Amino acid sequence: MPGRPASAARLVTGQIDALGSSTSALVVLNRGKPQKEFEAKITLVQNHFGIGMRRGQTDLRQWVNTFLYAIKNNGELDAISQKWIGESLQPLPTF
């Protein structure tokens, strides 16, 4: 079974008609071959990325949370999502 780069190459060259991948892979494919205009057909799972840090680093965690809160509320986080993913920021999970 071919790996991801080989599968993407087959999609780009027309050897296969569909490929399951992440949204970010779709963005990369479209930047490399804009004339192909690959598009997402279905979303199987909505993934959210996270920031990892060592347990017990409460100051760092508080700084990161405050930073994310600020850029989410001022629209900058949505602008980053638009730039790199090509779509508006999806609702973030809460706990």
Image (cartoon, helix red, strand yellow):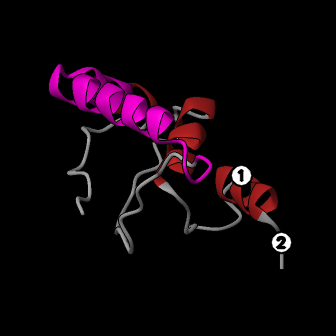
Q: Give residue 4's quadrant in the image.
A: bottom right
Kindly identify the residue that appears in the image at 27 percent across and 23 percent down: 71
Indicate left or right for 84 with 7 as reference: left
Q: Quadrant of the C terminus?
A: bottom left
- Image coords of residue 3 (percent x, y): 81, 66
Q: Amino acid at mark 1?
A: Thr
Determine if the magenta segment contains residue 76: yes
In depth, the one of 78 and 95 nearer the eye is 95
Secondary structure beneath dot 1 equals loop
Reading the chain from its start, which is encountered first: label 1 or label 2? 2
Residue displayed at 46% across by 41% down: 58
Report the span colored magenta.
53-80
The residue pinned by badge 1 equals: 13
Residue at image coords 37%, 35%: 62
Q: Quadrant location of residue 18?
A: bottom right
Q: Identify residue for label 2.
A: 2
Q: Position of residue 55 (x, y in %)?
A: 58, 54
Where residue 39 sits: x, y (%)? 41, 52
